[in-house]
Amino acid sequence: MPKPIRIRRRSVFLSLAFIVLIGAGIYAGYEIKFTREAKARAVALTMGDPDRGRDLTLRYGCAGCHTIPGVPGAQGNVGPTLQGIAARVYIGGVATNSPDTLIQWIENPRSIDPKTAMPMTGISRAEARDVAAYLYTLR
C-alpha cells in the first residue's frame, strides 16, 4: 500500500510544480508586455529615451535625493519617491502633472516653484526629456 501513496504524492507535487511554472511564465510574459507598452507610451508623451533617462538620473544626482525604482543605489529620502509618478496629479505639489510640465520641472524646477528645495542640476532640455520618459515608465 505505501507505494501507491508515494506515487500519488509525487504526481500531485509534479502537477503543482507544473502549474506554478505555467503561472510564472504567464506573469513574465505580462511583465514584458507591460514594460514594452510603458516605454512606447513614455516615448510618445515626452519624445525622450527612457533607457538613457535611467542613466541620467545617476549622472545628475537625482538618486541622491529620491528613491527611484530600477536605479541602483537610488534610495534617497530627501525628496519623494519617484515610483508611480505618472499616476500623480501634481508635480512638486504645485503643478499639474503633464509631460511638458515634468520636463520643465526636471530642467528648471524654480521656474515652476521658486521656493522648491529641488536644486538646479544643469540638465539640458533634451536630457530632461529622457529623464521624464524614464519616470513615466515607473509604476
Image (tube, grey):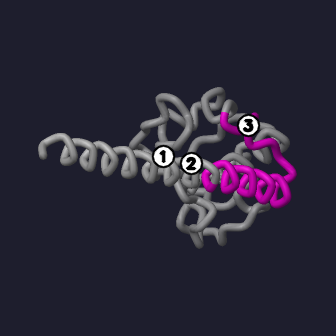
Mark 2 and mark 1 in contact? Answer it, CB < 8 Å.
Answer: yes
Mark 1 and mark 3 in contact? Answer it, CB < 8 Å.
Answer: no
Q: Main secondary structure of the magenta part?
A: helix
The residue shown at (79%, 39%) is 127
Q: CA distance from mark 1 to mark 3?
A: 30 Å
Q: CA distance from mark 2 to mark 3?
A: 25 Å
* Picture coordinates of residue 121, whole percent (x, y): 66, 36
Q: Is residue 5 above or below residue 89?
A: above
Q: Residue furthest front?
A: 1
Quarter of the picture containing the C terminus is: bottom right
The residue shown at (67%, 56%) is 34
Helix, strand or loop status at disc 3: helix
Asked whether the viewer can see residue 94, the reply is: yes
Q: Nearer the viewer, mark 1 or mark 3?
A: 1
The quadrant where residue 45 appears: bottom right
* Picture coordinates of residue 82, whole percent (x, y): 53, 51
Which region shows up in magenta? Answer: 30-54
- In primary-sequence order, the first of circles 2 and 3 is 2
Q: Is residue 46 magenta?
A: yes
Residue hosting label 2: 25
Q: CA distance from mark 2 to mark 1?
A: 6 Å
Residue hosting label 1: 21
The quadrant where residue 57 appears: top right
Which class describes the residues within 10 Å of circle 3: few (<14), some (14-19), or many (20+)?
Answer: some
Amino acid beneath label 3: Asp
The quadrant where residue 76 appears: top left
Amino acid beneath label 2: Gly
Amino acid beneath label 1: Leu
Question: Looking at the rendered structure, which numbered label has been put on residue 51?
Answer: 3
Helix, strand or loop status at disc 2: helix
Q: Is residue 47 magenta?
A: yes
Mark 2 and mark 3 in contact? Answer it, CB < 8 Å.
Answer: no
